[in-house]
């Protein structure tokens, strides 16, 4: 039976029950109404006529007047036409006869006997009608009681039928829908063996057949891809096992999913016993594993004893993000992606670390060795400029001037290389002392004043002497400020202005150097503090070694400070560094 037919039959049945109850109630109410009408229509009228005739007798003297006779006879005539009870007709006839005798013998002294007969017949008629009223009232009450009982029974039956219908009928639609909803959730949870079975020949049966066919197709697809997935899993595990980097993978619950041979060897873990365990319990017994799964923010290489020597490993971690196909209880997708775990990779950088240390040592050695001949060249140039050695023409003086500038530049580069080697080898030594910011500014200004005067550049200084002191290395901090000022002088036009400001901002002393040159392109700003990086120039300004700002960054961060810049093309550049107050 189709669902539409079931609904029609159900609502038709409801209509039939309601109609039956209404007709039953109407029948009994109509019967009760008829009983009540009989009491008022018949017996009440007879009592009214008797009362009227008795009033005539009581209110008049005998013999009766014509008007009194007329009233009495009118009521008697009406009563003769309203005889309804057994014995009432005989009483009315006797009443008429007694009344005629009473009228005919109105002047006789024994009229009282006729009057008594009239009154007796009136009382008889009244008694018959009163008895009838009482009996009919009892019948009406009985009919009312029966009507109440029948209506109550009918209402109870209708209520039970309707209640049973309301409870059971929605199940014809709701129960199959609930089964469909449950089955769909199972399919969403990848339970492709879920099936639905309906025996009714309706739309739900056809829909269940289609659902079962879909689930069967999905199950076949799942089984067909399972072997491929297993094969790919084995292949990926083989690749991970043969990789030269130590790799460990965790799922979203923190359980170890895989651990290749090199990782097992470095962390001294048995892969067969480790896989499947929670990393929180393993890291309590393995300090290296704890450092790997809880990496520090500095991202420094890990020094690990491996291959019978101290080796260096760079840790890289990645969180695996996958699409979220799970639903909550309200069938609502809360997030489009979710974490499937993390992968930690230890890259062996021992060889690169050794090459870097060799490079640093070589730079330090060469820089140190270059200082001596450069100092000799500077001394020789100074002697050549002395007139006691001999006079030089203009061309010779220009050549000596160029040699001196290049010597100064080489000497500065060697000093920077020496500082860089100290930073890279960890041998940077800072002599911390409480210093006034004004002293750092004066030291830097004295170092660049000659260069500023040569280009007629105005150094505008804004630094008050009452600023709080800073705990820094005086010479290293001044060197950073000198580097900022030297760069500003190099890229500023003649007769321009350079501003040097020092302020107290949020418990920090902020130093800033602002020039009004052409500015730095935004694409170069992020790399400006990288080692050996140089902003491309137009050939008018000599570029440095690319180490000054990198070393400045190392100096300031070693003093727990921050360094940064702001620049825009055509508006100049502003270099900042801030230090915590002492």
Image: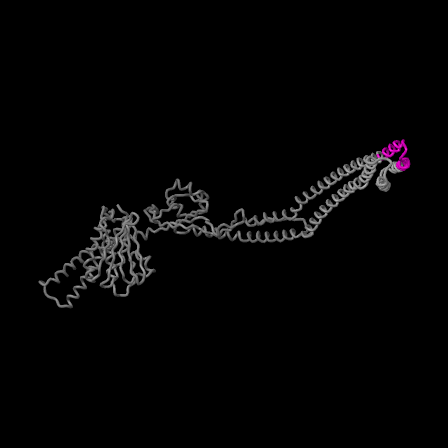
Is 559 or 357 nearer to us in this picture?
Answer: 559
Residue 90 in view in this figure: no
Magenta stretch contains residue 430: no
Give the quarter of the image for residue 164.
top right
Colour scheme shown:
one colour
**Which residue ends up furthest to the left in the rendered image?**
388
- Lateral position of residue 365 relative to residue 318, left or right: left
Measuring from the top left, give residue 281's x and y in whole percent: 42, 40
Residue 159 in view in this figure: yes
From which residue to which does the magenta span run? 97-122
Identify the main secondary structure in magenta.
helix
Count of marks, rendered view:
0
- Lateral position of residue 345 relative to residue 88, left or right: left
Quadrant holding the C terminus: top left
Q: Is residue 524 above or below residue 132?
A: below
Measuring from the top left, give residue 211's x and y in whole percent: 61, 52
Magenta stretch contains residue 108: yes
- Lateral position of residue 97 relative to residue 434, left or right: right
Measuring from the top left, give residue 341's x and y in whole percent: 45, 48
Is 507 or 392 nearer to us in this picture?
Answer: 507
Measuring from the top left, give residue 311's x and y in whole percent: 33, 48
Is 169 or 41 nearer to us in this picture?
Answer: 41
């Amino acid at each position: 039976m189709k669902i539409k037919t079931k609904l029609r039959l159900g609502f038709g049945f409801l209509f039939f029950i309601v109609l039956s109850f209404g007709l039953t109630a109407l029948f009994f109410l109509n019967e009760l109404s008829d009983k009540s009408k009989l009491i008022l229509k018949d017996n009440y009228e007879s009592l009214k006529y008797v009362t009227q005739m008795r009033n005539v007798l009581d209110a008049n003297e005998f013999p009766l007047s014509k008007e009194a006779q007329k009233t009495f006879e009118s009521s008697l005539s009406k009563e003769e036409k309203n005889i309804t009870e057994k014995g009432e007709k005989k009483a009315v006839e006797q009443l008429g006869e007694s009344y005629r005798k009473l009228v005919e013998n109105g002047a006789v002294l024994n009229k009282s006997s006729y009057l008594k007969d009239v009154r007796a017949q009136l009382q008889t008629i009244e008694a018959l009608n009163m008895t009838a009223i009482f009996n009919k009232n009892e019948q009406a009450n009985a009919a009312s009681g029966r009507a109440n009982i029948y209506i109550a029974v009918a209402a109870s039956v209708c209520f039970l039928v309707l209640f049973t219908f309301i409870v059971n009928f929605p199940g014809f639609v709701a129960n199959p829908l609930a089964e469909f909803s449950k089955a769909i959730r199972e399919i969403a949870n990848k339970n492709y063996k879920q099936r639905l079975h309906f025996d009714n020949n309706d739309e739900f049966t056809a829909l269940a057949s289609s659902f079962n066919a879909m689930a069967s197709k999905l199950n076949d697809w799942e089984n067909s891809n399972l072997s491929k997935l297993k094969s790919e899993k084995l292949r990926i595990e083989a690749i991970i096992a043969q990789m030269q980097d130590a790799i460990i993978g965790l799922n979203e619950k923190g359980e170890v999913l895989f651990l290749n041979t090199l990782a097992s060897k470095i962390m001294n873990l048995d892969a067969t016993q480790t896989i499947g365990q929670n990393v929180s319990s393993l890291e309590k017994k393995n300090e290296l594993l704890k450092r790997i799964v809880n990496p520090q923010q500095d991202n420094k290489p890990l020094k690990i004893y491996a291959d019978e020597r101290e080796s260096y490993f760079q840790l890289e971690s990645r969180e695996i993000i996958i699409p979220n196909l799970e639903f909550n209880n309200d069938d609502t997708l809360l997030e489009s992606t979710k974490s499937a775990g993390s992968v930690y990779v230890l890259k062996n950088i021992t060889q690169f670390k050794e090459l870097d240390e060799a490079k640093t040592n070589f730079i330090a050695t060469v820089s140190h060795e270059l200082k001596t001949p450069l100092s000799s060249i500077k001394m020789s140039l100074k002697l050549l400029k002395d007139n006691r050695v001999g006079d030089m023409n203009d061309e010779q003086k220009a050549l000596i001037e160029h040699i001196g500038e290049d010597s100064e530049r080489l000497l500065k580069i060697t000093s920077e290389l020496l500082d860089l080697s100290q930073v890279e080898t960890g041998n940077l030594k800072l002599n911390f002392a409480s210093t006034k910011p004004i002293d750092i500014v004066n030291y830097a200004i004295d170092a660049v004043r000659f260069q500023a005067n040569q280009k007629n550049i105005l150094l505008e200084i804004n630094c008050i002497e009452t600023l709080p002191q800073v705990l820094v290395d005086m010479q290293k901090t001044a060197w950073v400020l000198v580097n900022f000022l030297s760069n500003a002088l190099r890229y500023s036009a003649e007769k321009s202005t350079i501003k040097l400001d020092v302020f107290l901002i949020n418990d920090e002393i902020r130093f800033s150097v602002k020039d009004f040159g052409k500015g730095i392109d935004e694409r170069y700003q992020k790399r400006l503090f990288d080692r050996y990086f140089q902003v491309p120039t137009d050939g008018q300004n000599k570029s440095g070694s690319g180490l000054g700002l990198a070393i400045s960054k190392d100096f300031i961060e070693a003093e727990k400070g921050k360094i940064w810049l702001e620049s825009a093309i055509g508006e100049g550049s502003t270099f900042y560094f801030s230090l915590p107050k002492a």
